[in-house]
Amino acid sequence: MRMNYPTIKARVLSALILVSVMFISAVRPETKPVVAYAEDKNTITRSISPLLSLYDSLDLGTRNLSRDAFTKALMGFEDLRAAGSLQNPNILSIVDFSLASDKKRLFIIDVKKGKLLFHTYVAHGRNSGQESAMSFSNKLDSYKSSLGFFVTGNTYKGEHGYSLRLNGVENGINDNAFNRNIVVHGASYVSEQMIRLKGFIGRSLGCPAIPTKLHKPIIQTIKDGSCLFLYSPDQSYISKSSMLAAEADTAITAFPIVNAAG
């Protein structure tokens, strides 16, 4: 019997191609990273430009939110949203630790509807400072606040009642938040009465604690995959944050776009 060598060679070649394709598919990553870092800074600028006008339309400046905090919050928010890391992608929460604790420094914004949903007090860690948060940490038992971007998790009932878990997404900056039990919860020491008594609100063990009368509706609003940004003009954090790596070159050009439009 005479062998048909061209046919055999064709079949072998087809088999080798099939194996190669299967191998390439096997090694290709199929899951998205928790955090995506944009390579095109101009693309980020364009994506946040429509949102920058919220700073003025919501009177965030007159409410004492720093423009720098808002710009940086939008950068990380859009980064996480583009990566598919946010299951609750229309809510952006910002804590502005450049403000003392007797000021309302928690801002919760519905960016889709263009509404400021909550503006209230929030505590910092007791070892971060007294009236203002000045020092930050990612270490266990530091009792300090951590800076940076977080994605909210699920709710549970714990020592402080109805609470919300937080997942820090910046390696070496806040990624110990879950292990440190850094959560959003209500606290009686976060109140105007405490401000009248002491001049500032009480401090937590590192958690962004909020007023008890608002903690349930706030948690219900921001739970299950929204972005939370804890800001301070802390140069150590800003220089280390990969989430803000693209921000430096875009912040200057972004705001004139809004101003030029009116």
Image (cartoon, rainbow, N blue to C red):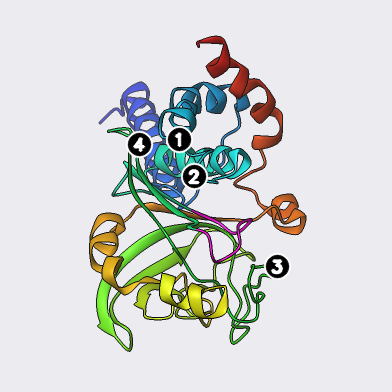
The answer to which of marks 3 and 1 sits earlier in the sequence is 1
Q: Which residue is mark 3?
A: 134
Q: Which mark is residue 214?
A: none
Instruction: Specify which label sits upstream in the sequence, 3 or 2.
Output: 2
Q: Counting residues from the N terminus, which is met first, the one under dot 1 or under dot 4?
A: 1
Circle 2 SS class: loop
Residue 262 x, y percent position in the rendering: 50, 11
From the viewer's perspective, tell me whether residue 168 is left or right of residue 242.
left
- Marks 3 and 2 sit apart, C-alpha to C-alpha, by 21 Å
Is tag 4's residue or tag 2's residue first in the polypeptide sequence?
2
Q: Is residue 191 visible?
A: no
Q: Determine which residue is flagged by label 4.
A: 111
For the point 45% across and 44% down, the residue is: 80
Question: Distance from label 3 to label 4 (Cα)?
Answer: 29 Å
* Label 3 packing within 10 angstroms: few (<14), some (14-19), many (20+): some
Identify the magenta region.
95-103
**Residue wearing tag 2:** 63
Q: Which picture quadrant has residue 164?
A: bottom left
Q: Position of residue 255 (x, y in %)?
A: 60, 23
Secondary-structure class at tag 1:
loop
Which image quadrant: the N terminus?
A: top left
User: Disc 1 designates what residue?
Assistant: 59
